[in-house]
Image: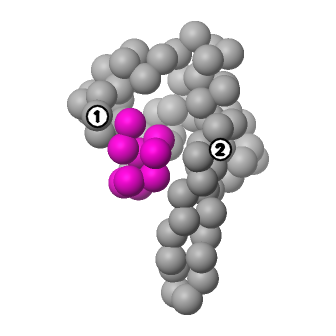
């Protein structure tokens, strides 16, 4: 799924397929991840579907859990 966001007269596209694939690879489903992030599962689904944005603290926590290197964060979240 592609998510389009308007930012300062630019259209930015986000696709969280790579993040979802890594979640599957690491055996971390949305229910588990939502619990670890201490957010409701529907809130996580909204974030993964581009209906709301991830907070910086959530990106950090997910990156730690999925062992995403700092240099790769943009590949998964932006």
Say which element carries label 1: helix
Q: Which of the two marks, 2 or 1, is nearer to us in this view?
A: 1
> Does 49 lie within the magenta span?
yes
State the residue at coordinates (59%, 30%): 20
Is any atom of residue 40 visible in this view?
A: yes
Distance from disc 2 to disc 1, alpha carbons, whole Å, reads 20 Å
Residue 77 coordinates in the image, percent (x, y)? 59, 49
Q: Is residue 6 left or right of residue 38?
A: right
Residue 3 coordinates in the image, percent (x, y)? 54, 57
Q: Which residue range is magenta in the image?
A: 45-53
Residue 33 coordinates in the image, percent (x, y)? 42, 23
State the residue at coordinates (54%, 65%): 4
Say which mark, if any, is on residue 2.
Answer: none
Quadrant of image for the C terminus: bottom right
Local crowd size for mark 1, using a 10 Å CA cut-off: few (<14), some (14–19), many (≥20): few
Q: Is residue 11 above or below residue 30?
A: below
Q: Is residue 27 above or below residue 19?
A: above
Label 2 with label 1: CB-CB less than 8 Å: no
Q: Which residue is mark 1?
A: 42
State the residue at coordinates (64%, 38%): 17
Residue 38 coordinates in the image, percent (x, y)? 27, 28
Q: Which residue is mark 2?
A: 76
Q: Is residue 35 above or below residue 12?
A: above
Q: Is residue 21 left or right of residue 58?
A: right
Q: Is residue 75 left or right of residue 30?
A: right
| Residue placed most toward the observer, 17 or 78 | 17
Is any atom of residue 36 visible in this view?
A: no
């Amino acid at each position: 799924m592609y998510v389009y966001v308007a930012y300062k007269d630019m259209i930015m596209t986000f696709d969280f397929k790579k993040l979802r694939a890594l979640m599957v690879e690491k055996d971390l489903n949305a229910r588990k991840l939502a619990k670890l992030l201490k957010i409701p599962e529907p809130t996580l689904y909204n974030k993964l579907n581009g209906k709301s944005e991830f907070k910086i603290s959530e990106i950090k926590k997910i990156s730690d859990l999925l062992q995403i290197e700092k240099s790769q964060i943009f590949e998964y979240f932006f």
